[in-house]
Image (cartoon, coloured by chain):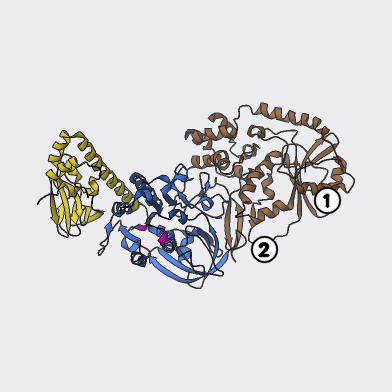
Chain colours: A blue, B yellow, C brown
């Protein structure tokens, strides 16, 4: 944990603000002291005196003196975040939650299905997988966004395609002039990638609609419940399994998740709400 | 245009579960067609008489709202089926399909394949199951797309 | 542990007077507002304490989870506290709260400080209240473990049994006053008779109520209609959660200088589970109403292997719409 108390923050200053798309910005933060996290774990980011919201860092877990957080403008608190400038101070609590168990991916093919802002935690996972790529068979990223403009981390794809064992595929719901990659929802990419299903781990991360359709398609293709890893989004607040806001059935998403296998949560009522 | 030898059909993912005999049937009733970039295979509401399996290249499926306004809905991957409407009366396509790169498709005569279904029920069942899966996936993707459009 | 002491009632209240004047905050139940509830005991009030009668309106959790608390203040210093009178149902509820707040990885220091700082003298109930039903859930109307000291009474004497090291240490210190003597267990023959009477009363009163597991199953299997029926008068005031000994959900509120205030919250308030995208799984009243029952009888027991409804019945008394959870449960069965 960043500080000795579960409620106290580690201060971090904003070094840079990057515009990813009309609604999405990435904030590069410098924490007061080194901050360690495992990929898939999340932080509670405090806007001083205003509010706090959960985010999964999108930077590499191997870097501890800098932290990148990608924030989509969806409401009250995130709108305020978007008004911040370099130099301002934020507070970090965490890291919290159960991240991606990358040790379980050794010797396997990894299929990552991402959509919209879900690419943020996936980017962090990709850094972690890049570091252990000699232990993996293959890493395939399928990413869908609404339009080419909404695609975040544009430089990421060309960089990954140059790395041995990594492949990326993109799709857009609505093409724009000049788009010559796949058109359609991200599930249309699944027929393209030819994974060895029995030896693949599938990671799904994105808006609830995308996670639902993506998971259903993967199950139809023959993936087993325990091969599919989901990152559940809920109203995480305290981050430490106490305040109850993120409860999903018997689970505290902030403590038992946010990464779950489909098998662990498939019987949860209102899973996709 | 000549068709493919049945041995070559084995490499196409659509025919994964077909026996050699089944593939021989397909080979007899299909031909290869080639299309250039931007060429339209068929328009929305056109009469279609062949089932198409994409062999090489890229295709785009879409619908038209008003004249000249084409909306691209989905790309088609090699090994996938289009023009499934040919198997159902009145054989009218529900979408247009355009080649977005130099393309090769396997065109299977729909009327001839239905005659083969009557002769070999197992072949018929297997093929209809594959067609149903294609339509199911396409329907699911369309709903996914629709939900995306309806929410912010 | 399990050392039994005997003290005369008058001597006990004099002892409390001395303690309250020194280094302890003492809370004990007295009659007020037509019922029983805790007050801070001082020299004048120590003889107003009501013993062995169910039960203080305030649940025990309030001493460890205040309604509003600044959780980022540097090292609080608290006066040592003695809490007299929590019934066995509240002590049982503490088990679940300890599992949530004292987990090794993320210990809540404010809760820990208050737990370590207080001495719990729980009391037998020789008289139950109208809605008490602890025995339905396997809880006896007298405390065993979970507290530091349990207090039983018989005629002119109180009998104090220690259940923890803290309790032992406290009683040893009190023994040095000479007013307390060790007792032997034979007194339990009489006390057991008193206890049996309450248990019988409770069992007779609540014979139609099923136990925790059956209740959980029935709730899981239930259709929508019963929830629509019982929630129709609910106004989501949250009184049931506020008064419940095991409800402990809270809201973290931000203040300047990165301070945070922890404030009591409940799933019964709208927007409790609303996510950034706008979806709210508990938006509909009957679903929100059912959520608390699922949590108490299915999810919390499943997750923590602990009882989450201790049968104290306070929610039934507190509900301003007079909704009775027991009525609902009996209709389900």
Side of A39 where C73 appears, left or right: right
Query: Looking at the rendering, which quadrant does residue B136 occupy?
Result: top left
For the residue pair A221 and A211, the one nearer the viewer reads as A221
For the residues beneath circles 1 and 2, the answer to whether they share a chain is yes
Magenta extent: A132-141
Residue C19, numbered circle: 1
**Residue B49 appearing in the image:** no
Q: Residues within 10 Å of mark 1 (few under 14, many from 20)?
A: some
Position of A4 relative to C29 (above/below)? below
Quarter of the view holding residue C197:
top right
Farthest-out residue, left: B1
Whether residue A90 is visible: yes
Q: Which residue is mark 2?
A: C74
Gap between marks 1 and 2, in whole Å? Answer: 28 Å
Q: Quarter of the image holding residue C193?
A: top right
* Crowding near the residue tagged with mark 2, few <14, some 14–19, many ≥20 C-alpha atoms within 10 Å: few
Q: Chain of mark 2?
A: C
Residue B10 lies, in percent from the top left, at: 21, 47
SS assignment at label 1: helix
Locate residue C129, reporting x and y percent: 70, 34
**Could you tell whether B138 is left or right of A138 in the image?**
left
Q: Residue at x 28, y 54 (%)?
A: A192
Question: Which x, y percent locates residue C37?
Answer: 73, 43
């Amino acid at each position: 944990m960043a500080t000795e108390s579960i409620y106290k923050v580690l201060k971090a200053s904003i070094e840079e603000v990057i515009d990813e798309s009309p609604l999405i910005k990435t904030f590069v933060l410098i924490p007061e002291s080194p901050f360690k996290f495992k990929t898939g774990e999340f932080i509670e980011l405090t806007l001083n005196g205003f509010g706090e919201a959960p985010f999964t860092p999108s930077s590499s877990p191997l870097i501890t003196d800098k932290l990148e957080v990608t924030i989509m403008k969806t409401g009250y608190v995130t709108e305020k975040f978007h008004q911040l400038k370099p130099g301002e101070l934020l507070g970090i609590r965490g890291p919290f939650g159960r991240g991606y168990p990358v040790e379980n991916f050794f010797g396997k093919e990894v299929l990552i299905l991402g959509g919209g802002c879900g690419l943020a935690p996936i980017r962090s996972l990709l850094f972690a997988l890049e570091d252990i790529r000699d232990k993996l068979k293959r890493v395939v990223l399928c990413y869908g966004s609404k339009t080419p403009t909404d695609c975040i981390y544009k430089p990421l794809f060309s960089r990954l395609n140059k790395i041995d064992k990594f492949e990326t595929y993109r799709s857009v719901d609505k093409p724009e002039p000049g788009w010559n990659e796949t058109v359609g929802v991200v599930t249309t990419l699944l027929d393209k990638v030819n994974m060895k299903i029995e030896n693949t781990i599938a990671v799904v991360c994105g808006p609830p609609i995308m996670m639902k359709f993506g998971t259903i398609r993967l199950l139809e293709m023959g993936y087993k419940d325990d091969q599919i890893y989901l990152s559940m989004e809920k109203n995480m607040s305290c981050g430490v399994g106490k305040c109850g806001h993120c409860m999903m059935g018997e689970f505290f998403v902030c403590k038992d998740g946010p990464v779950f296998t489909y098998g662990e949560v498939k019987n949860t009522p209102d899973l996709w709400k | 245009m000549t068709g493919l030898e049945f041995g070559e059909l084995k490499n196409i993912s659509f025919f994964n579960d077909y026996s050699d005999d089944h593939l021989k049937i397909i080979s007899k009733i299909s031909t290869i067609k080639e299309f250039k970039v931007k060429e339209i295979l068929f328009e929305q509401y056109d009469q279609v008489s062949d089932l198409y399996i994409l062999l090489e290249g890229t295709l785009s499926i879409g619908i038209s709202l008003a004249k000249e306004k084409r909306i691209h809905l989905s790309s088609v991957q090699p090994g996938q089926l289009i023009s499934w409407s040919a198997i159902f009366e009145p054989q009218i396509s529900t979408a247009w399909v355009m080649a977005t790169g130099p393309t090769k498709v396997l065109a299977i005569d729909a009327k001839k394949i239905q005659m083969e279904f009557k002769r070999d029920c197992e072949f018929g069942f297997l093929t209809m199951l594959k067609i149903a899966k294609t339509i199911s996936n396409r329907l699911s993707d369309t709903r996914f797309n629709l939900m995306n459009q309806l929410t912010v | 542990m399990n050392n039994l002491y005997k003290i005369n009632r008058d001597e006990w209240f004099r002892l409390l007077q001395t303690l309250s004047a020194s280094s302890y905050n003492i809370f004990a139940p007295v009659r007020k507002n037509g019922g029983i509830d805790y007050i801070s005991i001082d020299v004048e009030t120590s003889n107003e304490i009501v013993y062995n009668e169910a039960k203080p309106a305030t649940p025990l959790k309030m001493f460890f989870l205040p309604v509003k608390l600044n959780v980022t203040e540097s090292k609080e210093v608290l006066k040592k506290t003695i809490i007299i009178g929590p019934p066995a149902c509240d002590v049982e509820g503490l088990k679940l709260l300890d599992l949530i707040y004292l987990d090794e990885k993320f210990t809540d220091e404010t809760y820990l400080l208050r737990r370590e700082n207080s001495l719990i003298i729980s009391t037998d109930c020789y008289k139950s209240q109208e809605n008490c039903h602890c025995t339905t859930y396997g809880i006896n109307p007298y405390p065993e473990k979970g507290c530091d000291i349990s207090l039983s009474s018989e005629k002119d004497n109180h009998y104090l049994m220690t259940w923890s090291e803290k309790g032992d240490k406290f009683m040893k210190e009190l023994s040095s006053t000479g007013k307390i003597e060790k007792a032997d267990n034979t007194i339990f023959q009489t006390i057991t008779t008193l206890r049996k009477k309450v248990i019988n009363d409770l069992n007779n009163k609540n014979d139609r109520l099923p136990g925790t597991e059956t209740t959980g199953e029935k709730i899981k299997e239930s259709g929508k209609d019963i929830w629509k029926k019982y929630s129709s008068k609910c106004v989501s005031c949250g009184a049931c959660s506020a008064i419940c000994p095991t409800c402990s959900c809270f809201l973290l509120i931000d203040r300047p200088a990165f301070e945070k205030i922890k404030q009591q919250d409940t799933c019964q308030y709208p927007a409790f589970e609303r996510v950034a995208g706008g979806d709210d799984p508990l938006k509909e009243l009957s679903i929100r109403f059912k959520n608390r029952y699922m949590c108490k009888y299915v999810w919390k027991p499943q997750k923590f292997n602990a009882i989450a409804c201790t049968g104290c019945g306070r929610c039934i008394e507190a509900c301003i719409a007079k909704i009775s959870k027991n009525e609902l449960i009996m209709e389900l069965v």
